[in-house]
Amino acid sequence: MKLTLSPASPYVRKARACAIKRGIDGRIAMWTVPTTDPSLAAVNPLSKIPTLITDDGMALYDSPVICEYLDSIGDAPKLFPAEGPARWKAITLAALGDGILDATQPRRREVALPQDEGRKSYIELQQGKVTRALDALEAQADSLGMLDTIGEITVACALGYLDFRYPNEPWRPGHPKLEAWYAKVVALPPMARTMPPAA
C-alpha cells in the first residue's frame, strides 16, 4: 500500500494513526507528492491528500474512506464498531473531530487575506463551530477511551491540530476533562509517532 504523506496534514495523521493502532503501519509506504502533481490527479481526480493506493492498485480517498479500509485489514480490534449504538457513537464522534478540522483548515487561509466584513464573519462562524464542538467534547470526555475507535482517533488529531496551528487560541481553558483525556492519549503510539513537525 502507498499513502500520500504530508506531515502537517491532520487528515493524513488520522490515517497513519489508524494504521499504527491496527498494527499494519509497516505495510504502508509513504508517498510524498504535492497536490499539483499530475501523478496524484491521475489516481484521484480531486487531487487531494490523503490518497491511499491499495495493494491491488485501487485508489481510495478521503480520510474517512481510507481509515475504514485500513480497519478492514489485520487482526487487531476494530476501530469502526460493526453495528448498533457503539457504531453510531464512534462515527458521530469522528464527524465532530472532522468538523473541527474542516472549520480550522480553511480559516488559516482566510486570516492571511485582507479582512473585510464578509471574511471576518466567515472566520467568526468557523470559530463558533470549534467552540461548540469543544464544549460538546468536554461534556462527554468521561466516556472517551484510549484511541479505541475512529471517533477517539479523529478527536485526538483535531486537538493536536489546534495545538499545532492555533497555539494563540488555547483550547484547554474551560475543558479540564478533555485536557486530561488528551494528555493521556497524546503519549500513545498512534499520536506520539505521528506528531507534526514544529511549526
Image (cartoon, helix red, strand yellow):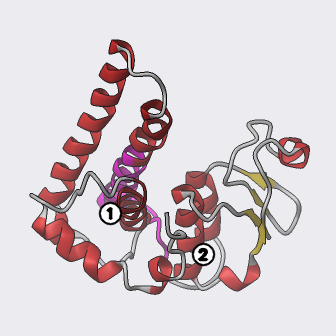
Q: Which residues are magenta?
A: 77-100
Q: Amino acid at mark 2?
A: Ala
- What residue sits right under mark 2 in the picture? 19
For the residue pair 143 and 167, the one nearer the viewer reads as 167
- Disc 1 to disc 2: CB gap under 8 Å: no
Task: Decide: few, some or many residues near mark 1? Use Cα within 10 Å; few <14, some 14-19, many ≥20.
Answer: few
Task: Name the foreground residue: 164 vs 44.
Answer: 164
Residue 162, position in %: x, y?
A: 36, 56
How packed mark 2 is, by other alpha carbons closer than 10 Å (few <14, some 14-19, many 20 or more), is many
Res. 131 image quadrant: top left
Residue at the (48%, 34%) spot, across then down: 112
Specify the label residue 86 is tagged with: 1
Give the number of marks: 2
Residue at point 84%, 69% (across, down): 55
- Report the Cα–Cα distance between label 1 and label 2: 21 Å
> Farthest top residue?
117
Asked whether, in this view, residue 175 is left or right of residue 181, the answer is left
Residue 191 sits inside the magenta stretch: no
Q: Nearer the viewer, residue 56 or 163?
A: 163
Amino acid at dot 1 = Ala
The tag earlier along the polypeptide, 1 or 2, is 2
**Residue at x-position 36% and y-position 78%:** 186
Q: Position of residue 103 (x, y in %)?
A: 39, 39
Q: Position of residue 154 (x, y in %)?
A: 42, 61
Secondary structure beneath disc 1?
helix
Residue 2 is situated, as x and y percent measured from the top left of the image, at: 79, 67
Label 2 element class: helix
Q: Quadrant of residue 137?
A: bottom left
